[in-house]
Amino acid sequence: MKRTVLSVAVALVSGIAAQTVHAQADEPIQPIRPPQNINLGQVELGKKLYFDPRLSKSGFISCNSCHNLSMGGTDNIPTSIGDKWQQGPINAPTVLNSSLAIAQFWDGRAADLKAQAGGPIANPGEMAFSHTLAIDVLESIPGYVREFKTVFGTDKITIDQVTLAIAEFEKTLVTPNSRFDQWLLGRKDAITATELAGYQLFKNSGCVACHNGEAVGGTSFQKMGLVEPYKTTAAAQGRADVTKQDADRMMFKVPTLRNVEMTYPYFHDGAANTLTEAVDVMGRLQLGKKFTKDENAKIVAFLKTLTGDQPSFTLPVLPPSTDATPRPQPFGK
Amino acid sequence: MKRTVLSVAVALVSGIAAQTVHAQADEPIQPIRPPQNINLGQVELGKKLYFDPRLSKSGFISCNSCHNLSMGGTDNIPTSIGDKWQQGPINAPTVLNSSLAIAQFWDGRAADLKAQAGGPIANPGEMAFSHTLAIDVLESIPGYVREFKTVFGTDKITIDQVTLAIAEFEKTLVTPNSRFDQWLLGRKDAITATELAGYQLFKNSGCVACHNGEAVGGTSFQKMGLVEPYKTTAAAQGRADVTKQDADRMMFKVPTLRNVEMTYPYFHDGAANTLTEAVDVMGRLQLGKKFTKDENAKIVAFLKTLTGDQPSFTLPVLPPSTDATPRPQPFGK
């Protein structure tokens, strides 16, 4: 099916390339391209791992719990719920199009998706497991042992293989074919006059300085509260948490605006419930600009054209545990 | 796709009916039949609702959280995790083939799947929401309003429609084509000599007195601890919790053994981690019989032939909330 998707996309792009190559080149946002060089064996394995709550201590939390692919690749709550209902410190970023970002996590502490994937498994506030325990579980399950052997050609499962497979699956989670991308590719009636006016405002007001590229964001770290400080109770300090440099305080990765209609609430602390509120705060704090109600509505209308085709796949069936599989510890201890 | 599945199944059954009609009639277990009279519009809507955590107070728990269709329709932990990580009082029964049971819940307090579906949403220890609040959420989401109108032809969403749609989806969650069903239908090499010996033991020892029919269980209430009392710390008293009759103490619905390889841990308190343990306890407490190691292994081998085709469908994409949608309350209050 992947192959079909790719060939359709290729046909689409090549068929209209001639008349649209200029339009694309002129715009600071590019259409999402189909993923390249994908290892389908790793994707299928990674999909299972992504949905497998046995990678958590409780047996209840999987990658998909907080990066829910039914809901725009996030959990739609301000900060996530971790092991024993711990409240997370930061809003779960969408996994959709995350392969297009310069780094992973809001503070960029992981260089890529593979480096990111191991984090939540071992984070005591999230899945609360350990890499060693996760491997013990996987090695006790013949269905996994066989699939890892097929995909990686080795008898021993490693955490490197686990995170590589999850990352490969995540690379497929791009959302092409949004109405805005159709417009970029030359279908001039794909967006309305109001939405186009919103895009012009988005460009002319300076939003696009940070929200640009294929993911409409994700390409740089920027200070949250540039013109006016951002008030929040969240402790996260962004890049400064990684670099320990004062200058990096409140420098966060610019989030993608792809599918932003689905990824509410907004900002690293999840404090903005609506796009209207997010656009207003961004205008004032980042650009020193108070958008009128009409301007705000037009920008929001534009943002909603960024919703693309959501990943479509069969819910994976996980190989069952065996008598030898260590049991989850949902309660106590 | 449903139509394809049905016609394949029909062809399968009719093609081999002639020589197998006797074999089937002679056995106390019947092959699973394809579901009949299914309303596909309700199924697609019900599938979304089944996966939607916005039917919970926290926005984190959906039907699929505890009846996980990647894991045999259950959560594979002794008792489930509810709102704020509350520990449930009883093991989550599998949703697979639940349409074949005489009643729903371990104590049969719901007559059918529709009556069951409303329970967890409003249970303070589970999804901790209310029917009114759930309807408020759904009515604020245009994607749902349109789909309910398409399916039910009315402008107003009701909890009756919600539970009817979820139940209709659940009716499709049957698991035909297990190796044992293939054997029942005449493919004599579908199970091994050991598995067949296990089935003979299962029949001759009396297991089949309760575990019979299409679901290999689910057709009656029986006392847990018939010959010897069952020791448990779980407070659940089975039918007595519903009827308030002393005679109904520890009378639980006989669980289905379909896909039992995937639905560990076992019993209403989830106390048995393995099939070996479950078979041993059942033999002693229900039949006054101590199975030898070899007998136990044969019965377990037979039980593993009851794993059928798992439901296969595309992960649903949920319609996004709007500015008007009441936000989940994962923390506090």
Image (cartoon, coloured by chain):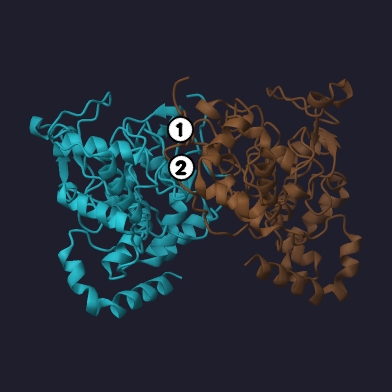
Chain colours: A cyan, B brown
Determine whether the residue tagged by mark 1 lies in a helix, strand or loop. Answer: loop
Image height of A290 relative to B316, above or below: above
Q: Earlier in the sequence, mark 1 or mark 2?
A: 2
Image height of B11 relative to A50, above or below: below
Query: Rounded to the nearest whole Å, what is the CA distance between mark 1 and mark 2?
Result: 9 Å
- Where is residue B74 drawn, in percent x and y? 62, 43
Residue under circle 1?
Answer: B327
* Whether label 1 touches label 2, CB < 8 Å: yes
Identify the chain of the residue marked 2, using the numbered disc in the image: B
Q: Please give left or right for residue B304 compared with residue B247 in the image.
A: left
- Numbered marks: total: 2
Using the image, tell me which numbered label, if any, was put on residue B321. Answer: 2
Residue at 78 percent of width and 28 percent of height: B238
Residue at 37 percent of width and 63 percent of height: A152
Determine whether the residue tagged by mark 2 lies in a helix, strand or loop. Answer: loop
- In this orientation, which residue lies closer to the viewer: B37 or B294? B37
Q: Amino acid at mark 1?
A: Arg
- In this orientation, which residue lies closer to the viewer: A238 or A28? A28
Image height of B23 relative to A206, above or below: below
Instruction: Work out whether residue A244 can be spotted.
Output: yes
Residue at 65 percent of width and 37 percent of height: B92
Write down the quadrant of residue B40 in the picture.
bottom right
- Where is residue A216 drawn, in percent x and y? 24, 53
Q: Residues within 10 Å of mark 1 (few under 14, many from 20)?
A: some
